[in-house]
Amino acid sequence: MVNSAIAAAPDQRTTPHAAADPAVLTLSNVEVLYAEVILALKGVSMKVPEGGCVALLGANGAGKSTTLKAISGVIDSEDGRVSGGSITFDGRPIQGHDPATVVRGGLVHVMEGRRVLQHMTVEQNLIIGGHMFPSAQAMRQAMDSVYEAIPRLAELRKRTAGYLSGGEQQMLVIGRAIMAEPKLMLIDEPSLGLAPRMVEEVFSVLRHLREQGLSLLIVEQNTRVALEIADYGYVMESGRIVLEGQAQELRDNEDVREFYLGLDREGVRKSFREVKHYKRRKRWLG
């Protein structure tokens, strides 16, 4: 049902993993302008390999969500535009394409905020996601695949979406995205506001989808769960990619944990003030 990368900007470090895997998505020196004034992305280059999982990490305001919106074309509806560089999906340039065209090409964006159609049932939400199917039989087959991938949705199929828990709504928007039969899914903050148990359930669903061959690009502030599922990670700061590497390398790198991800040696998130002090100390020592 689903199909599904990694490298660096030309001026960044390239790894054997990045070079060897064919990319389903490539960003090359992408810049984004808001209101023709604010430069939100500054030369962002990254890749997502076919069948792989990439984590895009960083603090609030780093440019992570803007990156996803630039890829999916949603940026145009927010008075923004890709003002430089190129975005290639499945071998074709997609910058400037409208979001519907991007979805039809096999790229689906699950936006932050669990945007379910609250007055509709779970099943009706899924039907909306599969509106492009040519027949009712094809629609039903796709829906059965969603229920197989996310059994909880099968139990809730007649439930009104607005009455679901936050975790159940997150599973529903993922299920609705699957109905479009994507090659690549962009997912923005899937764990936001969820209890730890529900975070594990949601990421269990993402692991299953990845095992089925779906490529994933995950924006996430919960660095622990993101780097557990990802092969490779990029760290953003102030609209730029400042670091990249294999997920295991990022998990084990003490400077990454303290400086970029705001974690101490025990994995506890440091306060903003502590991180800023660490940055000043690093610059002074460097």
Image (cartoon, rainbow, N blue to C red):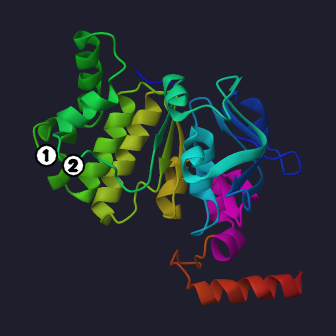
* Residue displayed at 20% across by 33% down: 124
Residue 125: image x %, image y %? Answer: 25, 36
Task: Rate crowding at label 2 as few (under 14), some (14 to 19) or many (20 or more) other CA atoms within 10 Å.
Answer: some
Residue 17: in magenta span: no
Is residue 280 visible in the rendered structure shown here? yes
Q: Quadrant of the C terminus?
A: bottom right
Task: Rate crowding at label 1 as few (under 14), some (14 to 19) or many (20 or more) other CA atoms within 10 Å.
Answer: some
Picture layout, residue 232 above or below residue 151: below
The answer to which image quadrant residue 215 occupies is top right
The answer to which image quadrant residue 165 occupies is bottom left
* Residue displayed at 47% across by 58% down: 225
Q: Which residues are magenta?
A: 232-260
Residue 247: image x %, image y %? Answer: 62, 53
Could you tell which of marks 2 and 1 lies nearer the N-terminus?
A: 2
* Residue displayed at 78% across by 87% down: 280
Q: Which residue is mark 1?
A: 160
Determine the secondary structure under disc 1: loop
Determine the secondary structure under disc 2: loop
Residue 167: image x %, image y %? Answer: 28, 55
Q: Which residue is mark 2?
A: 118
Looking at the rendered structure, the kind of residue marked 1 is: Thr
Is residue 5 visible in the rendered structure shown here? no
Picture layout, residue 62 above or below residue 24: below
Q: Quadrant of the N terminus?
A: top left
